[in-house]
Image (cartoon, grey):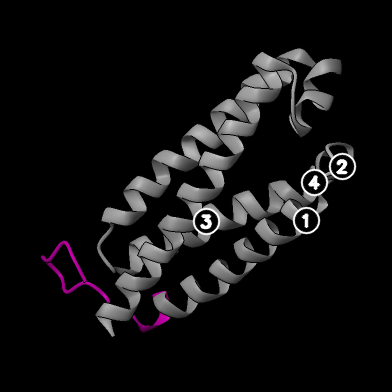
Amino acid sequence: MTASRQTLLRANALFLLAASAGGFCSDVLGIFFATGPVAKIVAVAPYSGLGFIEAHGLAFLIGIQMWRAEPSRAWHLTAVAIHVLLGTSNLVFWQFFVVADMLVVGYVTTALHVLFVVLQLIAASTATRPIAGHARA
């Protein structure tokens, strides 16, 4: 069971790394070269680029940490929190996907955030609780 929970964390990491790298590249092209879907948004709100760069950069860094994470209850619950935040952000700011003509990206990434919330909750429920005095499950 530990191996499957480790695989889940690594799959989660790959999704975060791939999606954030793609988003970051799109951000850079739109912000600095006025090309691609993000260009439509930063043209009318130039400083919004800061949030795009930060969000995708932090998601990449979290993906690196998720790759190295132990398959413990704490890490699975951390993954749940990450995907609740990112998925909720997608929904709250859905208009971004509409304006940027990126609805497919919105559907796919939001669906994957929801899927990872469910899978990580299941994994957290199957992880053993740490024994008093021990740091890891």
Instruction: Looking at the image, tell me whether mark 2 or mark 4 is earlier in sequence order.
Output: 2
Which range is magenta? 124-137
Label 3 crowd bin: few (<14), some (14–19), many (20+), radius 10 Å: some
Measured from the top left, where is residue 100 in percent x and y?
A: 83, 37
In the image, what residue type sits under mark 2? Gln
Which numbered dot is residue 81? 3
On the image, which quarter does residue 22 sit in? Answer: top right
Q: Residue at x 35, y 61 (%)?
A: 75
Label 2 crowd bin: few (<14), some (14–19), many (20+), radius 10 Å: some
As drawn, 128 above or below 27: below
Which SS class for mark 3? helix
Quickly name the residue at label 2: 95
Quickly name the residue at label 4: 102
In the image, what residue type sits under mark 3? Ala
Taking 14 as reference, is 100 left or right? right
Closest to the camera, between mark 3 and mark 4, is: 4
Residue 12 versus residue 89: which sits nearer the camera?
12
In the image, what residue type sits under mark 1? Val
As drawn, 91 above or below 30: below
Say if the magenta span includes residue 135.
Answer: yes
Cα–Cα gap, marks 3 and 4 = 25 Å
